[in-house]
Amino acid sequence: MVTYVQDRELLVQLAQAYGISTEFWGYDGNLRQVEDHTLVAVLESMGLHIDSEEAIATQLQRRLHQEWYSVLPKCPVVRNNCATPIHVHVPHGARVRLELLLEDGGRLALNQGDDYTEPRMIDGVLTGQATFYIGEGTQLGYHKLRAVVETQAGESEEYEETLVVAPHRLPDGKRAWGRSWGMMAQLYSVRSRNSWGIGDLDDLAEMGSIFGNLGADFLLINPLHAAEVVGAMSPSPYLPVTRRFFNPIYIRPENIREVAYMTAPQRSLVLWAGEDVKKASLENTLIDRDRSWESKREALEVIFQVERSEGRQRAFDRFREIEGEGLEDFALWCAINEAYDGKIPSHLRDIQSPFVAQERLRLADRIDFWAWLQWIMDEQLRDAQRIAKAAGMEYGICHDLAVGVHPMGADTWTIPHAFAPNMGVGAPPDMYNQIGQNWHQPPWKPNELEDLDYAPLRDMVRTVLRHAGALRIDHVMGLFRLWWIPTGCMPVEGTYVRFNHEAMVGILLLEAYRSGAVIIGEDLGTVEPWVRDYLGERGILGTSVFWFEKDDDGHPKHGRDFRRNVLVTVDTHDLPPAAGYLAEEHVDLRARLGLLEDSEEKTRQNARHERALVFERLREYGFMKEDASEREIIEALHAYITTTPSDLLGISLTDAVGERRSQNQPGTDQEYPNWKIPLADGTEKVVLVEDLSTNPRLISLIQTFKNNLENRE
């Protein structure tokens, strides 16, 4: 590997050809050059072999002419609202015809158009280009392009590649004639009297019923992605081991059908397993995932051994068949981690090795168990969505998709070639974090995703959306570009790497269209303006948060000036609840943890000034009186967002019950109990699911919110 080249321009051209930024604007307004060693490291992580300037020149020429090196393009993703050219490359003078093998078994001959592109010499063969067209209105789906090439010598060869036809945009649905509102909750924090110390899918179903009955159209929850199976479970739902499969800690054991047919001794084992952790649900103590999972897994092991009926077994078998190799490999990863106490030996780190094949046979029973857990999750997610829709929700459950995965997780083990080695994803320096951030999450390789026909993306989205009516994409800019940081480097030494956003978004839209789901992109922070326009064009909603929407003078924006195609909320899980903000508890916390950029006094002055501007705006709209109570101010904040033209509006459950504590304090790891705070009211009394439908503060807020919303329809 070279870390410095004399001809930097050559290296810059190669990097840019692969979508790697060679310079970027810093938060201080200065244009910064990306160092040579960073560019080389990123290129090598993409699989390029760069050991000399001659190698760089060779790689550059191949990249610039890459489409000429294969007959068919790699997995083109096209829109269905216009004719799209497909360039085919064959020996000059050869005849070629192109047809589309449709997903449903049909065939469609493609029309050839005029193409006067001059032939090129490629690997010693004079190669020409022919152009065919995918017609406007072509059937949506994952199809196959088949090229039949007849050489001048009379020989015939066939070539195939995947072609994806995606919708131009998602349909507006209900949003075409009216706005919708919903609730937002951190599921793990919302427990009932029968929860096993952590909120679960039965609690989700109950909330779907409660809020649907109150008029909500969706319930947005935290990511339910799978976490570690042994050892300490990461509390952050945004650092999963895989984004495709789910965390079985959210299963409600008693709701599994086989429990009804257990013997008395077996049922006693299940009841005893949950006895102690159920008491924790009634206490305002930090959520202990490890304790809950230990108890729940003990019960699940007993239930798994109960004989299933033939019909139930067939349903389980069908689920495994549908999920295919991805599920079997994930279950194998779980079983190996279980067998080796979370420390996979070096000889088992390559999933293709014969040693792993032996483990697949040896651990077959445990693979069955881990696959069964995913089936049970799927059933209980299906039931939760069905109940939410039956209660009147338009969309039902809205899942959240994390931006990345754990570097030592299941995804990096089962599909390692999809990830860039020796790279972490993060953020460049900004005014709040002047050294930048490294989240230590490996990025997908853009070029490898194309070679894999984007299977990791489409499989993940399809699974998550199977029982959901909406999906929030955390850091939606990740579909466009990510900040890559070479291992051993500081965040400031990273650079942006661009993805084929047209393909990524197209596949996301195809899966969402097929499931009838709404897509919400979290586009807060630094987002290139054209990206928001692009997302709007494709029917993907953005995100607006009241506290971030300010005029140039620092006042909250007028409601009319908010964007229309967004989900608008008062706050997020990364901000203090409204009650905590009003009480300045966020300043107290950051001062205690040493996270303040300015002095505590100045920070409080700024917070009070911001609050005064907010109150001024609320009074201007007639939502707040001079001597308003905390409850009335929070209701006024939510009344204010009804004045926006935004398509979707969300109410945080923490705001609705008067919780003051933050669920997550950015910039901390062990200093604050992130993602462990149980739902409680302003007096720190636990609020249970059973209490929600009669909680006076929640009912008052929702009624005030609905009244204001209806007055503006």
Image: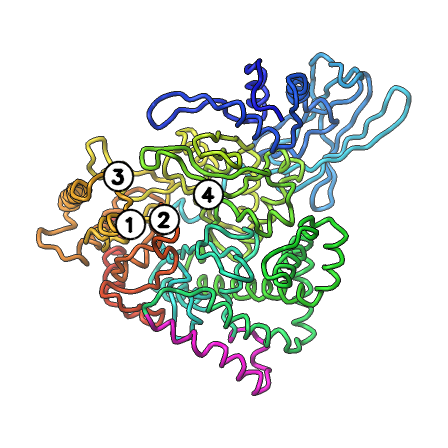
Mark 4–mark 1 distance (CA, rounded to whole Å)? 20 Å
Report crowding for label 1: few under 14, some 14 to 19, many 20 or more residues within 10 A (C-alpha): few
Looking at the image, which residue is at 25% across and 53% down?
578
Q: In this view, does 115 lie above or below 459?
A: above
- Mark earlier in primary sequence (4, 2): 4
Residue bearing the label numbered 4: 439
Residue underneath mark 3: 597
The stretch in magenta equals 254-283
Q: Check contact, mark 4 vs mark 1: CB within 8 A.
A: no
Q: In this view, does 107 lie to the left or right of 485?
A: right
Residue 105 drawn at (x, y percent):
74, 45
Marks 1/2 in contact by CB < 8 Å: the verdict is yes
**358 left or right, relative to 240:** right
Label 2 SS: loop
Read off the residue under disc 2: 668
Q: Which amino acid does label 4 sit on?
A: Trp
Among the 4 quarters of the image, the one containing residue 490:
top left
The image quadrant that residue 677 belongs to is bottom left
Between the residue at mark 4 and the residue at mark 3, the CA separation in whole angstroms equals 21 Å
Q: Position of residue 24 (x, y in %)?
A: 43, 24
The quadrant of the image that shows the N terminus is top right
Q: Which mark is residue 593?
A: 1
Q: Residue at x 42, y 39 (%)?
A: 437
Compared with 392, 5 (above or below) is above
**Which amino acid, mark 2?**
Thr
Q: Where is residue 298 drawn, in percent x and y?
A: 55, 73
> Which is more N-terminal, label 3 or label 2?
3
Image-based side of 251 in relation to 636, left or right: right
